[in-house]
Image: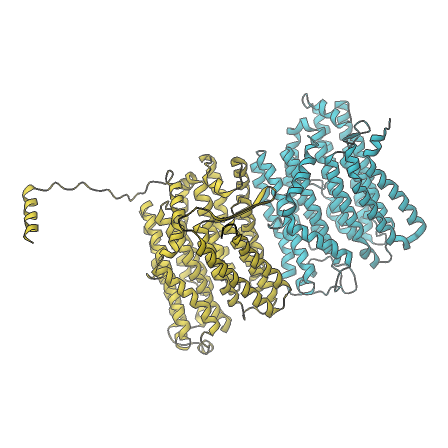
Chain colours: A yellow, B cyan
Amino acid sequence: MDGFPILSLMMAVPMAGAIACLFAGANNARWIALIATLVDFVLGIVLWMNFDQGGLQWQFQEYAPIFGRFAWALGIDGIALMLIALTVFLMPICIGASWNAINKRVGEYMAAFLFMEVLMIGVFTAQDLYLFYIMFEAGLIPMYLIIGIWGGADRIYASYKFFLYTLFGSVLMLIAMMWMVHEAGSTEIPVLMAYNFDPHVQTWLFLAFFASFAVKMPMWPVHTWLPDAHVQAPTAGSVILAGVLLKMGGYGFIRFSLPMFPEASAQLAPLVWGLSMVAVVYTSLVALVQSDMKKLIAYSSVAHMAIVTIGLFAFNQAGIEGAMMVMLGHGLVAGALFLCVGVVYDRLHTREINRYGGLSINMPRYAVLFLFFTMASVGLPGTSNFVGEFLSLMGVYQASSWVALVCTTGIILGAAYMLYLYRRICYGDQVNADAAAMPDLSIREFWLMAPIAAVVLWMGVYPESFLAPMRSDIQALEARLAPAAPAGDSKIKMGAPKPKSEGHHEEASAHGEAH
Amino acid sequence: MIDSASLLAVVPELILTVGGLALMLVAAFGGDGSARIVNWLSVIVLAIAGVSLSCSLAHGPNAFDGLYRADAFSAFAKALIYGAAAAAILLAPRFFSVGGNPRPEYPVLILFAAIGMGMMVSAGDMLTLYVGLEMNSLASYVLASFMRQDVRSSEAGLKYFVLGSLASGILLYGISLLYGFTGSTAFDGISVALGDGVSKGELFGLVFVLAGLAFKISAVPFHMWTPDVYEGAPTPVTTFFASAPKVAAIGLTVRVAIEALGPAGLDWQQIVIFVALASILFGAVAAIGQTNIKRLMAYSSINNVGFALIGLAAGTPAGAAATMSYMAIYVIMTIGGFACILQLRDADGKPVEEIAKLAGLSQSRKGLAAALAIFMFSMAGIPPLFGFWAKFLVFDAAVASGLTALAAFGIAMSVIGAFYYLKIIKTMYFDEPVATYEAKGGPVENIILTACAVVIVLGYLLNPMLDQASAAAAASLF
């Protein structure tokens, strides 16, 4: 693979597809989009196969200084690899989910999705600070159009809110980036990751980046755009929003905030913990009282993302690995749950929970898959989310036992709202005749969800496949953070062994001989 | 005394003058029938003048004992001005042919305005500056009221004339104060005199000069003529006002601030910072309620001038370069945007200016809507479009010179501006169609539109070139 620009190719394929879709008819556009995303998926597998685990930190690097002040600089580490894998895995599923659901302006829709894929891969591969920003911000355009054109009844409000919220979060980050580039004299992310900024300035820089990533993540109290955007977006839009776009916030923390501003991260960790604790408890409670399925899952996303921030700001390997696993697991599970909502929405065109009921009778296959993803969302051992949540909470326990205590209640609350949701939809009596008449999953729908289920299971049973590529990068990050990491409050103190009486000891050894 | 080197340095102006006068004769004898040929000939004249910039550059930088500058800065600005003027000429015929025949005076007036604008950016002396400014303004007043039978157009011309004269008066008063207290009208003479500290009188002169110039660039608080004139003037004329004279006035302001008032940098920096932030904020907030797209573009231009001035506020060569780059990108976006607006004609060919009538344009005119959306996203400063890079450059210059708070405040307010650009996109893409539109645009319009859109989308590839040109332009000022 030496020198072959596979990352550029992975961005070129969907870009070409997007342009082709703009000029194609509805049916052709669907096929172009599916083929382009599948080709990208294959390229993603090739990328993973050729990734040298534990080798150089940055691999598949490309560098072309064609933009004057910044460069087309790409390269990935294990963390980026995993997120790229998530992206290319979810994209064909998104296209498939929109196959019949979208029937107006299909070409533009598919083009927007493919353009989105280009930008997502760009965000995770960019090695130049400004290139990253451009990719990060550009994602607003296709998502704005996806929500605004193909969204639900209140789509216009949701699209504005999404756009302006995230834009406002990001612009301050740009100013901070400019300052950093002038200070460090380089736009290259690896250089900046190793540069030691003055700790006093770090606080400001951290806050500027935090404004952007906290909105993107989203963290309480700037999460309010997410339920609106999710509810109004078409199914595939929700899948990609929950599956990948929210991960950009977490990726931002892991790539920028933590390694570039370690002192400020340590200093402001209590702030992040506080917001995350509120998010876990508060948004879980909010989720409990939702009557709209998508809104419920959206609030549960906020709670899960809070577990991610908790893990990241635990400043130890278990926490950061856990955060990455939650991001990957949540990307799959939340995506799958939105697909589950999409399946029944396509049939009955409502997201009201009490319009359904007893679906396990007439839709048994659906009920099984939905149950599986519900359990995964709860964090049942054997599914992806268990691994991530357990590691995150274990990591944060070493940093602060109180935070761990409060956040662990999120698991119980998560079980409460998810099982309550499941009971209302799939169990009980079939009170609504039209819901009772819905046909079970079609073959297309089944094959959209089955691969996700398989990967969720794989990730839960053998997480090492996913942890191994990231391990050395997370170790490097931990080493970078170590000097600044706050001391934990739950350091276990090894007690001195009790002096034992001579006679007792002899008695014990005599016992041993007797055996 | 006039030497041949000086004459060679002003060769672009000479070409335009001779061309303009000759075409005026053609127009006078040929009547309205000659409009088409005069149009094309004036574009050719502008192109020749553009090519001759290299000759002018070779015989610079000073001509006529410092009254006139032919340096990289003026060449950069003139290239933009001539390009924008040519686009304004090319976009006009379809518009004027709706209400009767296109008239050949239009391109000729634009040529004369172009001479004035060239003088503005090449001025090395307050008197050259004033002559250039008035030459441009006189042509502009006539252009604003070009549709004689239209009340709005006449009103625009009159308003522009009255307020423009007021601004010229303020400017002249400032020049006279500066002359009185420094003993010179030459930029370098003023600069030398200001070098030993700024006296009260000089400060007053400086403030009045900047106020007069702020009127010409339509910066807050001297912006009030802009929306009325932009709305009332015929759309091709608005295209012209929003592009070429803006470049000339901003270029002039940058040159005066740095070459003449350079030693008083700390004094004008405060003024420029205030004017920049006020323009950004007012341009953004006032645009939100607009229902007419031309008025909206007027507020948008006020907003954009504010951003461009942030580069000047930095007061560094990088800042001046950023301001000029900003104008280059702004001109492309503006011309592209107006080329779209000019194509908004209903089934009878009548121009549509109501924003509400844009509803559903993305379904009736796919390509046009896409192009307008590109320009709007670009003006809002959303990457990956080139408009983002314009804003990036000015904020980067501000951050580099230590004005981080200004940059943070300015960029935060750009989010307000994003809202009304989004409103247009929302209307075109999310709403259901209400109006029917002419099926397709003219070939010239489409070519200009496509060219602008391509530059806005792929502009980053031009970065090395733009960086080099704007840096050379800025270096010639310091």
Q: Is residue B104 left or right of residue B386?
A: right
Q: Measured from the top left, where is residue A204 in percent x and y?
A: 48, 39
> Where A357 sits versus B23, above or below?
below
Position of residue A214 in the picture relative to residue A502 (left or right): right
Name the residue at 18% across, 40% down: A496
Q: How many marks?
A: 0
* The residue positioned farthest toward the front in the image shown: A2
- What is the x, y in percent for residue A387? 35, 56
Vertical position of residue B355 compared to residue A354: above or below:
above
Query: Could you tell whether B125 is left or right of B359 in the image?
Result: right
- For residue A407, above or below residue A208: below
In this rendered view, identify the residue nearer to me: A117 or A230: A117
At 90% from the left and 53% from the top, the residue drawn is: B34
Could you tell me which residue is drawn at 39 percent across and 58 percent down? A285
Q: Is B415 drawn above or below residue A244 in the view shown?
A: above
User: Who is closer to the viewer here, B177 or A437?
Assistant: A437
**The residue positioned farthest toward the top in the image shown:** B196
Task: Kindly tell me whether residue A273 is visible in this rendering.
Answer: no
User: Which corner quadrant holds the C terminus of chain A?
Assistant: bottom left
Whole-percent x and y of residue A301?
43, 58
In the figure, residue A21 lies in which quadrant? bottom right
Give how far across and how far down residue B315 sits, in percent. Answer: 64, 33
Extreme-right residue of the structure: B29
Dividing the picture into quadrants, the one containing residue A151 is bottom right
Is residue B57 visible from the viewing direction of this image?
Answer: yes
